[in-house]
Structures are given as structure tokens and as C-alpha cells.
Image (cartoon, rainbow, N blue to C red):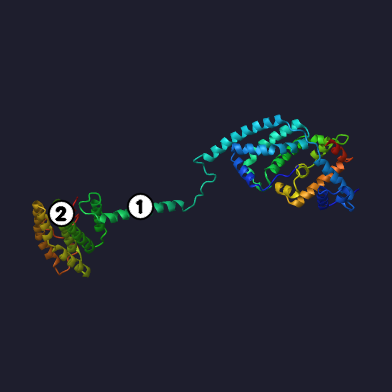
Amino acid sequence: MLAEPSPRQLDEALARRSGGATLVEATGLTPAAEELERMLGVSEAIASLPVSPPDPGAKVRIRSEYVRSGEARRSAWVHHHSLPIRPAKHRIPSHPFRWTFTVGLALVLALVAGTTLAMAAQLAEPDNAQLYPLKLNTEKMLVATGRTPTGRANVRIELATQRYRDAEAMAAKGKGGLAVQAIKAYYDQLRAAGVELERAPRDAGWKSVRASYLKAETKQNDVIVNQLLNSGQKNAVKSIQAQESQFAKDRKVIDAKLSLVTQPNPGANPQPLPSGARPQPAGSPTP
Amino acid sequence: MAPPAVDDRSERELILRAQRYEAEALADLFEKNFDPLQRYVTTIVGVEGRAEEVLRLVFLKALESLPKFRRYETGFAPWLYRIANSILTEKSRAAAAAAAEPLPEGAGPARLRQAIARLTPDQHEVLCLRFIAGLPATTVARATGRRTGQVLALQHRALLALGRSLDPLPVEDAAEAS
């Protein structure tokens, strides 16, 4: 039994042999020299195995099949990499808050869009046919949200002031019809505010709102009338003056009721206004 | 047989293009590797007819596995040699029954080739890459995903097994045949 060299010894002997050393030099004086020599001999026999001469025909045949297969794979590769939509290998994992988030986001977007539109509508004037009706509807909702008669009266006074400004703007633009409608809405809001104040308990808040009411009802239409006259709109002036005189009559009744010092009976019905005006709903001009 | 150039940037680009199955790149790879691979395979199998079949299978298998190729640093040729080894050892297993029979009488290339074919697939691979392809042990290690020590051990066991199965030594006969 021959002594076996280690793999490292064999590799070193192979390196020496390939470097030009003789077999004896390559194997050295080790107990495994004989086995090393035998293994080197085998390796050299393998390295010097005869090579068959190349067959040109074989190369042509193999190349032809190889090219055909390559072209087919190229077509498949292009198709595979050019599909515009491919199904996902893994579905998107569902999350318990996924739908909550989606609905919440939709609500937030709707709220933002609605708020933006409402804010834009608040700047609209009666000659804006798209946004002005939205503004009036928003104002109706604003009145409806008032919890107490005093609160609703306060809102109506604010709206009456806004209508008066609308009338001024329309008169300045020479739009008599819209100015008349705005003035009518102004008086209607004042009448409705008067009814609300009449039924409201007389407290500190009531007194404050009543003061606002008295201030709002004493606005003069002189500027509006003059502007309409300057633009030659006599019919509109006549309508406004008729509205003004009608409200002057109603105002006396309302003022008389609001000047009462005693607390009203909560169950008593408010007395109808002489002109038949109703607190709900207040008339609004339409463009 | 000279070892193939490794870490070649142009070859890497060529392989990357071939991985997209660009016809020109595939043709270039074929032309560059066919002759060395033919020498490698015919050295191992010895019979031209069988070599053609093995070469055909090697290139078709290479086309199929090309997108998975990642060993750019060791080059394309060792990868083809490994595919050839895989096909050759598979064929050898198919003829496993023959392994029980004694080696042919006499000493010559045919006897040596048959002895090599009876090695384990790992020994067969390392031995062919080292002594037929002429690759250094470190390159064989990188190309086959082994440590250099493992390659040296496999080389050692393969040569030991061959030396004991071939008696008398085929050195002189093989030299004569070459």
C-alpha cells in the first residue's frame, strides 16, 4: 500500500511539473512520492488525450439549430417584456383600514371642494346666474341653523344688510330689475327679523340684536335711487319707492312691538304684520 | 488548452446582450466558444458522432439557461464546460450498468476515457475543468461555486481513483496516442 499524498502536496507537485520540473523534482523526497508520481502521470495522460479533428458540418448544423432556437426565444423575450399590463404576481395585501382610508379621503376631498365652492359663492352678486342661487341657498341653511329666535333674527339682519349691498351694487351697474329684487329681499329679511325678535325673550342678547335691527332698518335708499335715475331707470325707482313706503308702514307696527318692555307670553302667537309678511321664508331675489 | 479570459468587460456586455437573445450577440458567443468547446467535448468523449450530439445539447441548454447566467467574473466558457459535464455525466449514469463491467483490456485513450466516465459527477467535473480545459484551481472553484480546498480535494480523490483503476499506467500509451 502506497503512502497517499495530501491534496496540497498534489497541487504543489502539479504546479512544479507544469513549471518544467522533472517527475522526480516535482514529487520530491516524500514517502508519498511514488503515489504522487502515479497521480501526476494520470493527470498528464488526461491532458494529452487525443483531440478528434473538428467536423465543419457539425458546426454548421449545430449553429443552424442554435440560431433558430435563439430567434424563437428572442420573440418570446420581446413579447414577455413588452406587455403593457401584466397581472401582479402577488396581490396587494388587504388592510383593515384600507376602505376606511379611501372613504375618509373621499369625504375630505368632497368637503374641501364644497367649502371652496361655497366660499366662491359668497362673493357672488345677483347678476351671477351660476353662483348667486347657491349663495341664497347657503343663506337659507344658515338661518335654519339658528337655535333661538334671537339668533335667527341676528342672521336675518346680517342677510338684510347683504341684500342692501347687493342692491347698491346692481344700481351702480345700472341693473334696475336686480336692484329692485335686492331691495325687496332686504325688506323681507327685515320683516322676518322683526317677527323673530317679537317672539324672542327680552334678554341682553335680544337688546343687542334689536339695536342692530333698528340700525339696519333705517338705511336710506337715496344713493341707490340716484344711481338708477342717472341710468334712466325710472320704473325701477318707482318700484323701490313703493317697497320703501310699504316697509315704512310695517316698520311702525314692528317698532311698536319691539318697544314693549314687558315679557311676552311664550305661548302667545305673534300678531300678523299689516302687510301680511311672514317670517318664513324670507323672499330672495333671483338673478 | 489555454484558459479563457475572465473578467472581460466586452464579454460581459456580450453576455448581457445575449441574455436578451439579441441575434448578433448569440452568434458572437457561438463563434467565440464553439471551437474550444468542441475540443473539450471530443477530448472527453472521443467519438465525433457522440460529440456532435453533446455539443448540440450544450448550446440548446445554454440558450435556455442564459437569462439565469450570473458568473460573469469567471467567463462564459467555463459555464459551457459545466453544462457539457452535466450532460456527459447524465449520459454516463444512463450507462451505469456498464460501470460494473471491467475496463477494456490494454492501455489507451479509450480505457482512460472510460475510467474518467466512471468518476463521480463532482470528481468528473473538477478533473475535466482542471486537466482538459486547463483552468487553474481557483478559477474552477469560482466557476463551480466551491472553495479552492474542495476543488483540490476532489482533484486529489479523482486522480487517486483513476490511478488505482488504471493499471498499468496509461502515461506512455496516451503519450504515444497523442
Q: In terms of depth relative to the viewer, which is nearer, A132 or A71?
A: A71
Residue A53 position, x and y percent, is 76, 33
Residue A90 shown left or right of residue A30 in the figure: left
Residue A216, image x, y percentages:
16, 63
Q: Which residue is mark 2?
A: A179
Measuring 59% from the left and 42% from the top, which residue is drawn there? B17
* Secondary structure at numbered mark 1: helix
Q: Position of residue A266 (x, y in %)?
A: 19, 64
Residue A196 or residue A71, whichever sits in front: A71
**N-terminal-most mark, 2 or 1:** 1
Furthest-front residue in view?
A20
- Where, by quadrant of the figure, is residue A46 drawn? top right
**To which residue does mark 1 refer?**
A110
Three-letter code, disc 1: Ala
Mark 1 — on which chain does it sit? A
Q: CA–CA distance between discs 2 and 1?
A: 34 Å
Quarter of the figure with residue A50: top right
